Amino acid sequence: MANFMRKIFISSLSLLCLLIATTAHAAEKPATLPEIEQELSLQAPNPEEIVKQSADQLPDAQPTKPPIIKTTTKPNLITAHNAFNKGLYKTAAKLAKRESKAGSADAAFLLGEIYRKGFGTQVDIKQALSWYRKAANMDHSEAAFTFGYALSQGIGLDKNISEAKLYFQKAAKADHLIAQYNLAIIYAGLAGQSADYTKAFKWFERAADQGHHQSQVDVSTLYSLGKGTKQNHTMAARYMQKAAQNGRSDAMVRYAIMAFNGKGIDRNLDQAVFWLKKAANLGQAVAQTRLSRLYYKGVGVKKDESIAVMLYRLALKSGAEDSWLEQEFNKLPEEFLEKGQKMANIWTKATAEQFIRLQN
């Protein structure tokens, strides 16, 4: 069930940040260095800017492996799992039913898997949910999460967020990573219930400390806002750095801006440029436009108008526009524009990696 723990099911919560103004003022004068720095300043998001993307199906099981079970000395349960492993699903179901009647949560969960995926029988979601519920009520964390998810989405039974929250709590208290995240989402007011940011922060933090990347971004944002916890820019930077180190390109941009502005950490242009380059290399359009500005002005990097043009042309491919850059590039000699465009045209992953190496 390892892939259960890697997926996000209710939603991909994004506490969106208004990172950088993308348009210039109508009467804007040619930017000086302080103005560039101000344009790169982090603006804290409003809680209303939280968005979610709902999933519409139960998490996939691994069809060739039995669910992970706790150490057991019950011979029927061991035999049931061995049979499951060998594809003898009817035998596994028969033995699991016997053990479930004797109060085995693992056996009940195994039956839920068998009926949900149709191992040796027809798919029967209602039957699967019945077994998940029995296992959950015997404190099986994976079953509690799965049944809570079904309740939250109205899959196989009526949607009931209040009841879903109870089952997520069961799993979350047993350190089920995704249950903690989904519980935090509910407490953040994203499932139609009133928000309790203190509890939302608690569960986001629990998930973040277990390595959940999105939760690390969300904890950072709540620290920045002072929502559900005391405002703490140092902790905000720390969690955003974790998410950046875990490969989140949006976190790379936000952490770069923190480093650029010296917010929560000492001002460090080298770190700001480093993370903007990494994010730009991943195709992050905001990073590409902000890095373009830095190359155009020679802030934190050697001034290079052609690289600035290249980065902005790459950002345009993702639909990111920057009126300030457009205005400034209109002042450039044609040779810089042509060179930058040619560089953008041949940009590949290999050239991106070479760019990072050469510029460091």
Image: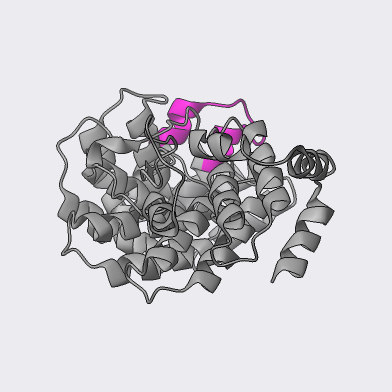
Q: How is the image coloured?
A: one colour
Q: Which of 219 and 167 is in front in this view?
A: 219
Q: In which quarter of the image is the N terminus?
A: bottom right
For this orientation, the residue located farthest to the bottom is: 266
Reply above or below: 146 against 211: above
Reply above or below: 163 against 180: above
One can see residue 44 in this view: yes
Residue 90 percent across, percent down from the top left = 65, 39
Reply above or below: 162 against 202: above
Residue 261 percent across, percent down from the top left = 37, 64
- Residue 21 lies in what quarter of the image? top left
Q: Nearer the viewer, residue 43 or 212?
A: 43
One can see residue 1 in this view: no
Which span is picked out in magenta?
113-130
Q: Quadrant of the C terminus?
A: bottom right
> Number of callouts in the render?
0
Chief SS of the magenta region: helix
Question: Which residue lies at the image location 16% right of the left edge and 41% below the top edge?
Answer: 195
Residue 121 percent across, percent down from the top left = 63, 30
Reply above or below: 301 against 192: below
Q: Nearer the viewer, residue 33 or 343?
A: 33
Q: Along the horizontal axis of the image, is 244 left or right of 122?
A: left
Question: Which residue lies at the image location 29% right of the left edge and 61% below the top edge?
Answer: 173
Question: Which residue lies at the image location 55% right of the left edge and 50% below the top edge?
Answer: 293
Q: Is residue 116 magenta?
A: yes
Residue 62 percent across, percent down from the top left = 64, 47
